[in-house]
Amino acid sequence: MSTSLKIIINPSELGAGTRGSSLGPLAVQAAARARGNPLFSEIPWEVLPDWNQLLDQPATTLFAKRIHGMREVYRAVSDSVSACLLKNTFPLLISGDHASAGGTFWAIKNAFPNKRIGVVWIDAHADLHSPYTTPSGNLHGMPLATALDGDNLGCQRNEVDIITAAAWKELKSHSLKSSDLIYVGVRSTEPEEDHIISSENITKISVTKLRKLGVEYVLSTILSQLKKCDVMYVSFDVDSMDPRETSFGTGTPEPGGFTQEEARQLLIGLCNSPKIAVLEFAEINPLLDDKNNAMAEVTLDLITHCKNTLLNRWNQG
């Protein structure tokens, strides 16, 4: 069981279609300094290397853009996160785009090869595409497919070349069962993703359902479904929140999301579970923020509450 915390800053934005998410972690740090929040002086942190310089060159693998650079991002994330897990240190990631979440799956599998992983994916999007189905080629729409080992060839729309196919195979971790994945807040999907969600009977908890049943009921539902899992990975994309209530400071904002308070209650509840092993925040983009640095400020608030919840639980345990 973890008894200490480390912040891992991953500035990669190789997987996004819009530039600026690499600045998201820096924006959170700036918000902390502006508000006198001691988060980054109290908690050890490191910045991972990135390969964002590849964005200066044309993409050659059009159905999985810059996938060879993403493989290096996966390795960097995996090395750092797995090192934390093996030392009973809780990794809290602040990432650029969501593509690198696949590296976190690598890390959990490397650290706990015999443990069953449960995932709570709090996001406006399903992130279930593969190079064979993607409409954009952007890898931030594919991280869960790498964990589920999903190509979704029955819905294939793209003819993928040998180089891309080989690189895609290298990204896969085969680390997650569809029955151990729970979506929260997903509200923008493509037909190819809907096919997997339906055929695999993947749990989706909508914003409407959470408001109707309450956060406590939803938390109970999540923990009940994942009761046979040994560890839990919670990944929070800030586009899960309503941009009109927070800000548009994210690459793919979608209306109808959670309020900041709903997100806070949900995350605090998940952090109170002894099974949580990794927590991640992703897709803050200050270049798109219509309210100065509001999205980073909201994220800082959420991270601070999560940090306090984890430390309080460990101190009491």
Image: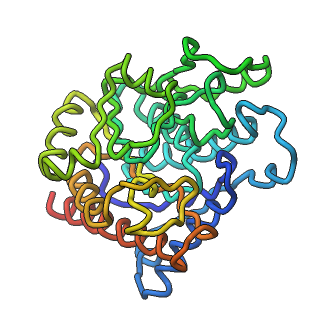
Q: Splitting the image into 4 quarters, where does residue 313 fall?
A: bottom left
Taking 230 as reference, is 82 left or right?
right
* Closer to the camera in the image, 29 or 113: 29
* Closer to the camera in the image, 242 or 104: 242
Residue at the extreme top of the image, as rendered: 154
Taking 4 as reference, is 57 left or right?
right
Residue at coordinates 29% horizontally, 31% vertically from top-left? 203
* Closer to the camera in the image, 38 or 100: 100
From where the camera sits, is residue 99 visible? yes
* Closer to the camera in the image, 286 or 89: 286
Taking 313 as reference, is 243 left or right?
right
Q: Residue 20: image x %, image y %?
A: 66, 63
Q: Residue 271: image x %, image y %?
A: 26, 54
250 is higher (above) or lower (below) than 158: below
Residue at coordinates 50% horizontally, 84% vertically from top-left? 33
From where the camera sits, is residue 280 visible? no
93 is higher (above) or lower (below) than 111: below
47 is higher (above) or lower (below) than 59: below
Q: Residue 263: image x %, image y %?
A: 30, 59
Residue at the extreme right of the image, as rendered: 57
Q: Splitting the image into 4 quarters, where does residue 43 fall?
A: bottom left
Residue at coordinates 67% horizontally, 55% vertically from top-left? 18
Q: Residue 167: image x %, image y %?
A: 72, 26
Figure quadrant of the C terminus: bottom left
Residue at coordinates 68% horizontally, 49% vertically from top-left? 17
Its colouring scheme is: rainbow
Q: How many callouts does the rendering have? A: 0
